[in-house]
């Protein structure tokens, strides 16, 4: 396994990984929502903050993607991506709009960056996640970013333990659904 910077050729593979590592979707609309909410912005707008785990044939099998600055992310996401989310699901649109204007906004002062990480089954448990997250942390530190946050499912104890191992702490729990974690860099 090797980690390298994201390349445009990785876009479709990263979308597939996003879909394959999420809870099963009922239809294509659900898959499109996943990629709009958790993938496309990062690979289209912040390529420099995306790293890919590749196999021996240079095929993406995992990734860590990041928005470096919340205010910049919010401006572009609301303008370019949120209208697409609204067309697919008014409920998801409202959910994202609320999160952008409440806890994400409040926490962004100290934790302006946020990340998403996904690795295909069969490639986890081998230190790949640790390599990805530490690569991103070093990248952001070099850019002078002061903190990073993420959201993880409240019941995802394995992921919460992984993030704690890498120095993230619980900042807020939202309705026993999502745990927001952060780390000062």
Image (tube, rainbow, N blue to C red):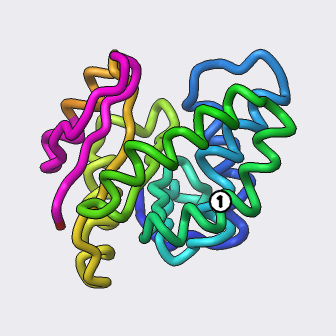
Which quadrant of the figure has residue 124?
Answer: top left
* Side of 108 where 9 appears, left or right: right
Quarter of the image where the C terminus is located: bottom left
Instruction: State the residue in front, 63 or 144.
Output: 144
Quarter of the image where the N terminus is located: bottom left
- In this rendering, the answer to whether 140 lies above or below 65 is below
Q: Say which residue appears at 46% left-offset and 32% top-offset.
A: 122
> Residue 94 location in percent, x, y?
65, 34
Secondary structure beneath disc 1? helix
* Side of 101 where 23 appears, left or right: right
Specify whether residue 171 is painted magenta: yes
Which quadrant of the figure has residue 162?
Answer: top left
The total number of labels drawn is 1
Instruction: State the residue in front, 182 or 121.
Output: 182
- In this rendering, the answer to whether 121 lies above or below 25 is below
Which quadrant of the figure has residue 110?
Answer: bottom left
Instruction: State the residue in front, 135 or 102.
Output: 102
Q: Say which residue appears at 16% left-offset and 61% top-offset.
A: 184
Other residues around mark 1 within 10 Å, as few (<14) / some (14–19) / many (≥20): some
Q: Say which residue appears at 73% left-offset and 62% top-offset.
A: 79
> Residue 75 location in percent, x, y?
61, 67
Q: Say which residue appears at 48% left-offset and 64% top-offset.
A: 67
The residue range painted magenta reads: 162-184
Q: Which residue is mark 1?
A: 77
> Residue 166 location in percent, x, y?
16, 49
Specify whether residue 29 is painted magenta: no
- In this rendering, the answer to whether 173 lies above or below 46 is above
- In this rendering, the answer to whether 168 lies above or below 146 is above
> Residue 167 location in percent, x, y?
13, 49
């Amino acid at each position: 396994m090797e980690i390298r910077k994201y390349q445009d050729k990785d876009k479709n593979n990263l979308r597939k990984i996003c879909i394959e590592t999420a809870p099963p979707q009922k239809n294509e609309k659900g898959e499109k929502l996943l990629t709009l909410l958790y993938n496309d912005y990062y690979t289209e707008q912040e390529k420099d903050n995306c790293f890919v785990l590749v196999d021996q044939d240079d095929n993406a099998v995992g990734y860590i993607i990041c928005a470096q600055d919340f205010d910049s992310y919010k401006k572009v996401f609301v303008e370019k991506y949120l209208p697409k989310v609204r067309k697919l699901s008014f409920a998801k649109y409202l959910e994202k709009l609320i999160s952008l204007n409440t806890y994400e906004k409040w926490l962004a002062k100290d934790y302006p960056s946020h990340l998403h990480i996904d690795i295909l089954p069969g490639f986890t448990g081998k230190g790949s996640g640790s390599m990805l997250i530490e690569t991103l942390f070093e990248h952001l530190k070099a850019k002078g970013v002061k903190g990073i946050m993420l959201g993880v499912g409240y019941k995802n104890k394995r992921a919460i333990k992984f993030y704690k191992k890498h120095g993230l702490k619980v900042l807020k729990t939202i309705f026993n659904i999502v745990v927001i974690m952060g780390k000062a860099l």
